[in-house]
Image (tube, helix red, strand yellow):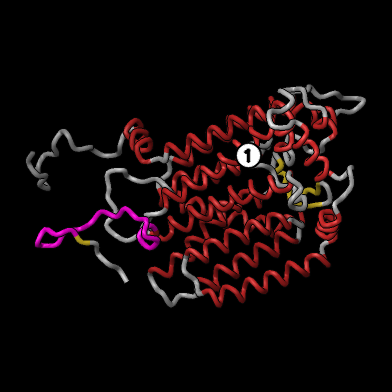
Amino acid sequence: MQPYVPGKRQPAHMPKGKLSRWSELKIWWREIDRVLLLLVLLLMSFGTIAVAAASPASADRLSTSSETLDPLYFFYRHLAWQVLALGTLLGISMLTRENGRRLGLLLAAGMTALLFVVPIIGVEINGARRWISLGMQFQPSEFLKPGFAIATAWILSWRMRDPNMPVAGIATAYVALIAALMMMQPDLGGTILFGGVWFVSMILAGIDVKRLSLVIGGLLALLTATYFLYDNARHRIDSFIGGGTAYDQVDLGARTLAAGGWTGAGYGLGIRKMSLPEAHTDYIFSVIGEEFGLIACAAIVLLYLAIVARVLMRLIDEEDLFALLAGAGLTTLLGGQAFINILVNLQLFPSKGMTLPLVSYGGSSTIAICLNVGLLLAITRRNPFLKSQTRGLGDLLGMGQTAPMKDQTGIARREIYP
């Protein structure tokens, strides 16, 4: 094959201009983490079945004397939202890493701005003002989560250009601003998630542990002060510590979860779910336990663990600090929210009003979660034919697969970076 010479006619085998849509799809399919995509689709499929099981309980509780909801009312709506969410997930996953970063930064800027106006024009539901109504109701904080993870990763990655940049202070100031705006709604559970993303990103970025411990100490002091200043949080914590009563929703969730035993009562045969509040959202894990059994619950937990493990495997040899931090932050959001929701259903954590991601019924929240997953797939895209030539996280941990380089004598060697 003759080499390409500028000025000569371009050979037929070389692409001319922009790639065709079919070529872009083939590249996307080659670079995407297909195992991660399969795990996500399995979880969404289980969620659809679970919503069908929980829908009669929620429809019955929300029916009135003047209007009786169809038992599968929430199931039908969930299917429509799932189609939109899946389209969002696949569309976002086709972005390049650079465009994914740009989209995340736009989300962070736009949703942070909306958080300032939520206390003014927001819609109040169940004592909290978290929603904005613009044709449909949505929580800016839900769409801010993936943007926050990417923005934090972008800020911390600046230190690769200039180690003297105060990236830790900027990232800490940003999370402090978000926490203050979130507590004005108030939303303690969401604030904890943002703090978790910040903590994981700071650790992976190699921020000095001493400085980090001082900040963490201050955050714990603020969290303690929240107990005395935030009535809703204090009541939930007191109820959790005191054990609650048979009428508390956390206790009802735990009883419903254990009612099905190992194999469950069977689809549509659950009884306790009928008295469970928010059966299709916050306590759908308990409905799964009653109708499909603890084995099904364990399978869902394993799916979440598999997703987290798969992302870590994908990132373990990542050379780009931004991609490493963004992927870890987005995974922290998904795994952290699932972890909190499951602990609440097991009566091991105070009720936080969080849905089970990719499983619970949701409108705009389902779109936001699939946006998070789509960005995660875009950030972790990788050309399978390119070998790593620099040290990544895997090399630092002694688990890397960096391709060995050869010197002039032909002896394989690994290049060492300070």
* Residue at x 29% of width, y 60% of height: 390
Q: Is residue 32 above or below residue 79?
A: below
Assess whether residue 403 is covered by the magenta stretch. Answer: yes
Left or right: where does residue 187 sit relative to residue 330? Answer: right
In the image, the segment drawn in magenta is 394-412
Name the residue located 61 percent from the left edge and 65 percent from the top edge.
175
Would residue 204 be found to the left or right of residue 181 on screen? left
**Left/right of residue 73 with respect to residue 366 in the rendered view:** right
**SS assignment at label 1:** helix
State the residue in front, 187 or 91: 187
Q: Which residue is under mark 1?
A: 366
Q: Position of residue 33 (x, y in %)?
A: 42, 40
Looking at the picture, how far across and down is residue 7, in whole percent?
11, 46
Q: Can the viewer see residue 216 in this picture? A: yes
Residue farthest right in this picture: 65
User: In this picture, is 368 found above or below 79?
Assistant: below
**Dividing the image into 4 quarters, which one contains the N terminus?**
top left
Q: Amino acid at mark 1?
A: Thr
Indicate the position of residue 406 as horizontal and vertical percent values.
Answer: 16, 59
Which residue is outermost to the left?
2
Which residue corresponds to the image point at 51% horizontal and 66% vertical from the top-left?
203
The spot of residue 224 in percent (x, y) is 76, 68
Q: How many numbered marks, from 0 up?
A: 1
Residue 288 visible:
no
Q: Is residue 22 above or below residue 365?
A: above
**Image quadrant occupied by the C terminus:** bottom left
Most extreme residue toward the front is 262
Magenta-highlighted stretch: main secondary structure?
loop
Pointer 1 local density, CA inside 10 Å: few below 14, some 14–19, many at least 20: many
